[in-house]
Image: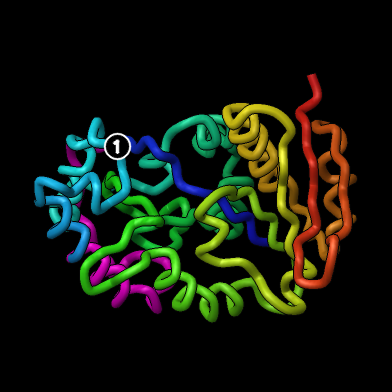
Amino acid sequence: MLILLPPSEGKTQRRRGRPLDLATLSFPELTSLRSAVIDSAEQVSARPDAHRLLSVSPNLIEEVARNTRLRVAPTAPAAEVYSGVLFDALDLASLDPASKRRANRRILIFSALFGVVRPTDRIPAYRLNPAARLPDIGDLTATWREVLTPVLEQEAGDRGLVVDCRSGTYTAMWSPKGALAERRVHVTVPGASHMAKHTRGLVARHLVQSNAQPRHPEDLVPLLEDAFVVRLSEPERPGRPWQLAATARA
């Protein structure tokens, strides 16, 4: 089973720590593109119009400035760098050792800068929108989709579920196709964005706490129904994901 998460908008910056070493990150097939994106992001972030080119608010100029030091800034495990509602609910640090090991195998966090990382990969804090267009790179989302597709299809293998807790632009970076799409379950949450992020974090936490290996979307229901009110819907047409609506029980 793979659990797909978005990154958080907010990121925790370490004061100390070793600098970025791309060779240590998961999925070495992505190293070349990661390096090119970093170089381009560093150059753009030093420009006075960086916020416009990177599609971020001008109020975030201090965070954008971090991008000029990506190769020398202190790093920390991605699970500690990404903060915010979803990752607070996931709360990986409080898991027992067996659940942490499952989380480190199952969870993939999507990133406009790195493509995809595991919770243990050491990365710096950064600010980059996948909707940005970078010099010599172009459309980040389309560029990452082309490179990520064969890598993640291989990672997903020929069995097990892909539980998708992403929303918005990050789903466009990779969406399973063909037979693999039939094993994708998109987690939806009624209500406001804050509650949706919180509930998706709780769903991911619940799944890594279980040693079960669900093979069919319907297998998720008994895994989650003790903690959530769930409703599973079949795809509207071939190639579309199953939909799992989840609401945390009081």
Report x, y in % for residue 56: 31, 43
Report x, y in % for residue 138: 31, 70
**What's the magenta region?**
13-39
Residue 3 is drawn in which quadrant?
bottom right
In this view, the residue farthest toward the top is 250
Color theme of the render: rainbow
Residue 147 is drawn in which quadrant?
bottom left
Which quarter of the rendering shows the C terminus? top right
State the count of labels: 1
Q: Residue shown at 24%/47% (left/top)?
A: 52
Residue nearest the observer in this picture, 118 or 180: 180
Which amino acid type is shown beneath numbered disc 1? Ser
Which quarter of the rendering shows the N terminus? bottom right
Residue 9 is drawn in which quadrant?
top left
Q: Is residue 45 above or below residue 65?
A: below
Local crowd size for mark 1, using a 10 Å CA cut-off: few (<14), some (14–19), many (≥20): few
Report x, y in % for residue 241: 76, 61
Residue named by callout 1: 57
Q: Is residue 23 above or below residue 248?
A: below
Q: Residue shown at 46%/51% (left/top)?
A: 119
Q: Residue shown at 15%/47% (left/top)?
A: 49
The answer to if 144 sits in the magenta stretch is no
Report x, y in % for residue 72: 13, 53
Residue nearest the observer in this picture, 98 or 155: 155
The answer to if 28 sits in the magenta stretch is yes
- The local secondary structure at tag 1 comes to loop
Residue nearest the observer in this picture, 240 or 35: 240
Q: Residue shown at 85%/39% (left/top)?
A: 230
